[in-house]
Image (tube, rainbow, N blue to C red):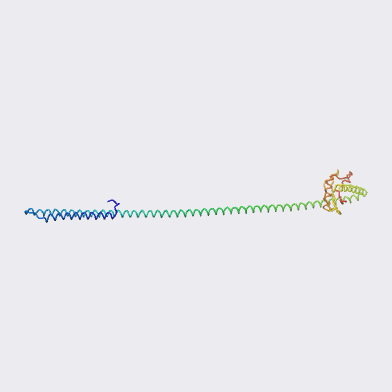
Amino acid sequence: MNQKYDRGTLIKALWLSVILHIGLIAVLFKGDFANETKPKKNTSVAQEVTPIKATVVDATKLQKAINKIKKQKADDKAAEKRANDAKKRRTKEEARIKKLEKQRKKKEQEKKRADKAAKESNAKAAKAEQIRKQKEQEKQKAEDAAAQARSKRLKAEAAAKKADELRKKQIDERKRKDKAAADKAAREKLLAEQMAVEMATRNKARQQQMMSEIQRYGALITNVIDQNMINDRSTMEGKSCKLMISLAPSGFVTQVRVVSGDAVVCEAAKRAVYKAGTLPVSKDPEVFKEMRNIDVIVVPEF
């Protein structure tokens, strides 16, 4: 039977079939009893047996009809059972489909939630990674800045140390040179004094002559210095300077050293000597020998 029939339709068909069969049985019974009760005229004994046989035949038909009805009922029940079974299977299948659909929707929702959670997790991870990289960059910048500052500080300390060492070296060198110059001036002065004493004891007259000659050239040299010297009353008045001048036989100035005196006057006097370049000297070898390194006292005149 077609599964599209529902239970109500089957029940209606079943009752319709029962009613039709009952109606059929009633018609059969009515026909049989009418034949049995209706009297016949002038019948024989043999004729009376015939209705008995007809009655038996009609009972058989009735039994067949009853069996047919029973069979129809059984078929209807079987059809109904098949319809119920089909409906149960259909209901079960629909329930299974609904369950599967529910499971699918549930899985889909779970997947959506999982995707959303994964997306949020990925976003958080990406943001955390971005923050980590930013912090790492800031840390690297700070380390670079610290390294640059440290390098700059070390360079500055090294430069300061080098400058201090150079300054100390220059001071020591200047002290050494000053001491050497002072020692040399003292030695030369002592030598000149010793030579003067020796010359005085050897030939007083010659010494006097030579000293006079030296003094004369000393005065000439002083005069040349005065001519080339730039004087300043405000800084030089009342002050003097003693120089030791080393000369070549031609009178060329080879060296000028400050023996003593005012620094301003000595500096101006040294410039004047170098400006002159050549100073008056004696042609007498002995006199020149004595005045090769001549002491000159410079007193600015105004």
Residue 257's x, y, as percent? 82, 50
> As rendered, which of 248 and 128 lies closer to the eye?
128
Q: Position of residue 216 (x, y in %)?
A: 90, 47
> Horizontal and vertical percent for residue 177?
78, 51
Counting from the top left corner in percent of width and height, residue 96 is at 35, 54
The residue lying toward the viewer, choosing from 226 and 183, is 226
Instruction: Answer left or right for 88 relative to 201.
Output: left
Q: How many labels does the image show?
A: 0
Furthest residue toward right: 205
For the residue pair 292 and 103, the one nearer the viewer reads as 103
Q: In this view, does 233 lie to the left or right of 143?
A: right
Describe residue 181's horizontal placement relative to residue 61 as left or right. Answer: right
Q: In this view, does 151 lie to the left or right of 81?
A: right
